[in-house]
Image (cartoon, rainbow, N blue to C red):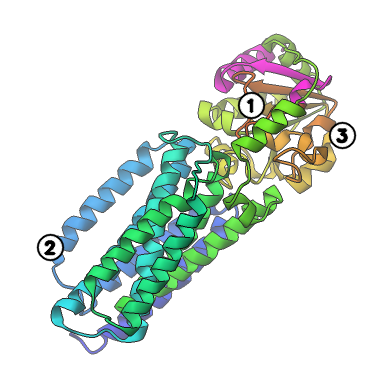
Amino acid sequence: MATWLPTGIQLSYLVAAALFILGIKKLGSPATARSGNLWAAVGMTLAIVATLLDQHIVGYGQLAVALAVGSGLGALMAYRVEMTAMPQMVGLLNGLGGGASALVALAEFWRASNLGTTLPPETLVSILLGVGIGGVTLTGSLIAFGKLQEWLTGAPVTFVGQRLMSVGLVVGFALGCAYLLVVEPTDLGVLLALTLVTLVFGVLFVIPVGGADMPVVVSLLNSLSGLAASATGFILANNMLVVAGALVGASGLILTQIMCKAMNRPLTNVLFGAFTVQQAATVAGVAGPQGSMKTVDSEETAMMLAYARSVVIVPGYGLAVAQAQHAVRELADQLEHRGVDVRYAIHPVAGRMPGHMNVLLAEANVPYPQLYDMEGINPEFERTDVALVIGANDVVNPAARHDKGSPIYGMPILDVDRAQRTVVIKRGAGRGYSGIENELFFKDKTLMLYGNARDVLTQLVSSVKQLD
C-alpha cells in the first residue's frame, strides 16, 4: 500500500463528514433541501470509496455485487414509493440500518470467539451497544412500518403484564452484559440470547404507541439507528462510521424534540400513553361537539374563493393521499390571476412526518415565500376571508385550545376557525387520526366539501375559470 493512502483515506473521511454537516444544514429548509440531499450523497459516495480503499477491505467481488443489489433496490424504492408512503420507507430503512449494525457487531464477536481472542473491554462494550440498540431499532422499526402501512392496527396494543415483561427484559439484558464483561467475554451463546432479548424488546417498545404518534417514534428510531452505527464504528475503528452515526443520532433526536414541541407533549407522554383508544373513546362519548355539519358544493366554493381578497390554504394528509399538490397549485394560480392573495399554512406535524407538506408543495413548484409556518400565519387568520382546509384534521381542531379532557389538549394548532369563513375538503365525515371529532367541523362559519381532494380541487379550478 502506498504510504500516502492511509492519510488520504482519513482526509477523505474528513471531507465526507463536512459534506454531511453541510447537507444536514441545507435539509433544514425546503428551499435548499434538494442541494443538501445532493451534498450528503456526494459525501456518502466519497466515504464508501475511501472505505473500499482501506487495507482492511477484502473480497471486492462480493462487495461489488452487494453494492449493485443495494443501489438497485434503493433506486427502485426511491422512484416507486409515493410521498404518502415516505414515512414507512424511512421507518423500514431505519430498521435495516439497525439490523446491519447488529449483524456487524455479532460478526466481530463471532470472529474473535473463533480465534480464541479476548476482546478489549471498550470493544466489547461497543459490541453490546451495537447489538442492543441495533436489535431494538430493527424490530421497533418493522412494527412502526407495519402500523404506518396499516398492515398492523394503528391502535395502541397492550396486555396484562406488558410493563413487567419489558422491565424484565431490560434487567435480563443488563445482567447478560455484566456476565460477558466480567465472567466470560467469549460466550457467543449469551450474546445471541441478548440479541433475541433486544428483538423482543423492540416489539414491546413500539406496539403500545398509537398510529398518530408513529412519526415521532420513527424519528426516534432514526436516531437510534445512528447511535447503533456509531457504536459499530468504534468496533471497526472506522472514524467515518463513528461521525456519520453520531450525526444521524443527533439530528434524529433534534427532529424528535421538534415534533414533540409542535404537539406540546413530552416524549415520555408520546411513548407511554398519549392518544390511547380509551382516552379518545372517553372524550368522544362524553364531550363531543354539538350541532351538525353544513355542506357546500364546488360551484359555491369557487365563487367564494374567486371573490375573496385573501385565501389561506391548509394542506393535510388528505391532500397527500390524493396526490393533489398539483391541483392545489393550479387553483392558487387561478385565484392569483384574479388578484386574490393566496398563502399556505404549514403545521409542523401535518401529514405523517415533519416537512411532509413542504416537500409535496415543492414538488408542485409552489413558491416557497407563500409557505408560512404556524407562528407566522396564525395572527393572519382573523384578516383572512377564506381558510381552505384540505385533508387536515387534528392540527385545526379548536378543542386543543380549551378542552382539557381532549387527548390533543395543549397541542398548538392552526387557528383556521378565526377566519371569516372556513371550507374543509374531506373524503368523509370520519374522525381524525387521534380518534376524536373535530370541533371545527360543527362551527357556524365552517362548510364541508366532501370528496377526493384532487377531484374536488380540479372541479374548483374549472369553476373558477368559468367565472372569467
> In front: mark 3 or mark 1?
1
Name the spot of residue 218 as percent of width and height, x first: 49, 50
Mark 2 neighbour density, 10 Å: few (under 14) some (14–19) many (20 or more): few
On residue 431, the disc is 1
On residue 14, the disc is none
Name the spot of residue 304 as percent of width and height, x first: 78, 17
Residue shown at 62% from the left, 56% from the top:
268
Residue shown at 87% from the left, 33% from the top:
383
Q: Amino acid at mark 3?
A: Glu
Residue shown at 42% from the left, 45% from the top:
143
In the image, is residue 458 part of the stretch drawn in magenta?
Answer: yes
Mark 1 neighbour density, 10 Å: few (under 14) some (14–19) many (20 or more): few
Q: Amino acid at mark 1?
A: Arg
| Distance from Cα at disc 2 to Cα at disc 3 | 65 Å
Above or below, 188 relative to 206: below
Q: Secondary structure at mark 2?
A: helix
Q: Secondary structure at mark 3?
A: helix
**Where are the magenta residues, as a range?**
440-468
Name the spot of residue 204 as percent of width and height, x first: 45, 51
Name the spot of residue 332 as percent of width and height, x first: 67, 28
| Residue highlighted by disc 2 | 61
| Residue highlighted by disc 3 | 382
Q: Secondary structure at mark 1?
A: loop
Above or below, 115 relative to 392: below
Above or below, 318 relative to 217: above
Above or below, 424 relative to 414: above
